[in-house]
Amino acid sequence: MMTENSHTPSPAERLKACSGVDVQLCYQCGKCTAGCAMAPEMDLPPSFLVRLLQTGSPAAYRRVLESRSIWLCVGCEQCIGRCPKEVDIPRLIDCLRSEAQKEGCVSPEASDIIKFHKSFLGSVKRNGRLGELDLVVEYKLRTLHLFQDVDVAPGMLAKGKLPLIPERIKGKREIDEIFKKSNA
Amino acid sequence: MSKIGVFICHCGENISATVDCARVAQAAAEMEGVAYATDYKYMCSEPGQQLIRQAIREHNLDGVVVGSCSPRMHEPTFRRACAEAGLNPYLCEIANLREHCSWVHEKGEATTQKAIDIVQGLVEKVRRNQPLTPIRVPVTKKALVIGGGIAGIQAALDIANCGHRVILVEKEPSIGGHMAQLSETFPTLDCSQCILTPRMVEVAQHPNITLYTYAEVESVEGFIGNFKATIRLKAKSVDEKKCTGCGLCTTKCPNKKIPGEFNEGLGTRTAIYVPFPQAVPNKPVIDKEHCNYYQKGKCRVCEKFCPTGAITFDQPDQFITEEVGAIVVTTGFRVLPTSFFPEYGYGRYKDVITGIQFERLASASGPTMGEIRRPSDGTVPKKVVFIACCGSRDPAKGIPYCSKICCMYTAKHAMLYQHKVHDGESTVFYMDIRAGGKNYEEFVRRAIEEDKVNYVRGRVARVYERADGKLVVRGVDTLLGAQQVEIEADMVVLATAGVANPGAEELAQKLHISYDPYHFFAEAHPKLRPVETNTAGIYLAGACQAPKDIPETVATASGAAAKVVSLLSQDDLVREPLVAVVNRCAPPVYSTCVGCFLCQTACPYQAIEREEIKDRQGRVIKTVAKVNPGLCQGCGTCVSFCRSKAIDIQGYSNEQMYAEVNALLNHE
């Protein structure tokens, strides 16, 4: 059983300040979940996730932070594209991800996903853009999934999709500036 | 020897596809009493009607049978055509060859034969028809409005402003009804009293309106245009002419702890009282049940203090009779008694209140001057739970229908609470949000989005008091996968269902109007005649039909007023002469009525009177039945009850009907 309304501190207010999204706008029509490509994989489908946030209860908030869903979202923005009330779920999820990391309650099932994000950003930081091989190497080192998907590598190499030396961009300094500003 | 014309219509192919119309006409021409018969493709068209008119003139016809569609469709058309040719319209009859024959049978010999039989029946009837003239009934140009809530006020003002006189009867000491009790109104948050009280004053001052408060309709007799209503004026114990409304008596009355009806029991009043400061008329009445003098025989304090000597004890109720042409019923509704759901603790916990009690708390004229305070200890509640559908949509314990207004007033209550208690938290338990109406959905969303009202979808199982004295509401959030929810509450507001008034059934029987299983008055047609009853001349408006919000109530009131005004704008009403008559072969002596008056007991419309037949010296020979043609609806019940066969319906006499049926049966 859950007790509602015991409200210090209010996660809803914190979330609203971070994301600028008012979850109370949602009237639970379910259109976001209906169209979500990842919903079948999610433990909390998008509309349910928003409903949990609407209650304002710390237990419900914790449940959202610990969920797999916030890490499974691919940010395709189909949900907000269709939402009649323009509730920006992807933006909400961005904030929830950083909150989950701050609170140290990231779903254990999300660790590979986070490692992928880190490898992706690491490659961009080094080269100014994504270097495919660069990404693959860092991801495998982080996760130790050494043989995952290796069967596709020859084909990609043959088609020139996996350049051995990553391409660097001219404006590398500006990219560095961006990373510095966002403290990453 | 009669000269009847028979006109068979093909109705395009509707009749001719299965019936041989030419043969029906041929057969008709040979029937006894028929002087002319023909068929035509569209008898109702202008050339078709011209055919009938011409035949009447050329052949000097004294009766017409049109074999065509249902008489409900074109009887008026053909009767008008006959009248234009100089024939009494009631000598024209319709043989229904379409609905009763061609549409329901295959093409064939038997179908044509049935058509011939139907025509034969009508020919036999028309041979016995008598010319009739429509009945003209004068109209009393005055209306009676029963109930002085916003519906009655609106209807009375609309009728009065059209120049007709109105009698407005209200059973309480003041007009205003439920609307006077409300705080603000959705979806605009207009102050209810600010928009209502000017209209109440307008009613009191209108030269065309006679207002009777503290009065009830005792009985109604008569019929459209000519009703006679007896009204009971309950004794107020205060002479209205002498009373100046100074209010001194109400301050001196020693009996001060009576729960006030206007404040729904949240405030008190005295035994001599004005229901609320803005009452119309603003003069007190004595509530006999709580008055020391009436109960114990002594006190009379008010009498001693009254500066004008207006207190008049021991007056009897008065009865007055008013003649009116039309009646509008606007008796409104009440909220369901809370005993229907003991699990919510109403009556057991002081801080569980009804929606209408919350209105009084939020109203500037209420017991707390508009501050939201708990009835138990007068503190400001910091957590309020609103429970929607209390009794509504609950066929097992409450009522199966949706009370319609609760979604909106609950949103308004939560909103008003948030406006008045800034650090307060409000939660609404709902099943669905039904906010159909101009700006209604936006209003509910405003409560949720701007005023931060917490809406939880699910019903409440029970409200209970915890050991520490806090109320706890246990419900469910079905949007969280049916998770149980418990919320502490300082106050709980129940959106109780709207139901019919206790006296509704009795009033309906007095007025001879129909009502539904919930005792709401029934309209003549739910869509196309929404403010009329099945009884001509009696109209409905407002929540006595079903729970209605203020805009809808006012709209129906103005609609009913328009109906009344169109009735009262006529000098007299024309009615079909198809009424019962008592046979009097050679009046006055030979009435075949034996005076048993079984008909009088059978008549559902009180249309049968007693008539004394006298000889030339004025001695009564016998007392017989007489039908009032204004009241008679032509139902024929009296005809079947009459033992001496002395009553007939004009146009449908026993002789005519037997002739018609015999003609149908008498062929080989």
Image: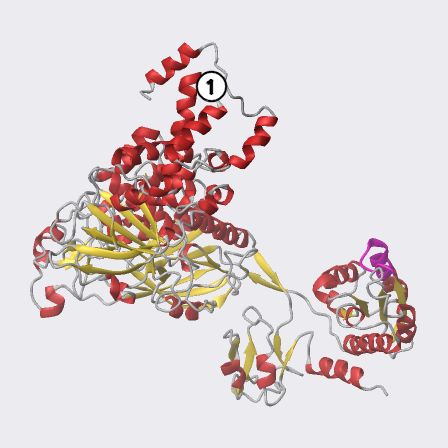
Q: Nearer the viewer, residue A179 or B232?
A: A179
Q: Which residues are magenta?
A: B41-53
For residue B440, which quarter of the picture? top left
Q: Reply above or below: B544 against A130.
A: below
Q: Is residue B52 visible?
A: yes
Q: Position of residue B620 (x, y in %)?
A: 51, 86
Say whether residue B460 is left or right of residue A160: left
Secondary structure at badge 1 equals: loop
Residue B47 position in % (x across, y down): 86, 55
What is the chain identity of the residue bearing mark 1? Answer: A
> Is residue B611 visible to us here?
no
Please give the name of the residue rendered at 35% of the width and 39% of the height, measured from the top-left corner. A24
- In the rendered image, which quarter contains the C terminus of chain B? bottom right
In the image, is residue B43 part of the stretch drawn in magenta?
yes
- The picture quadrant where one finds residue B626 is bottom right
Residue highlighted by disc 1 = A129
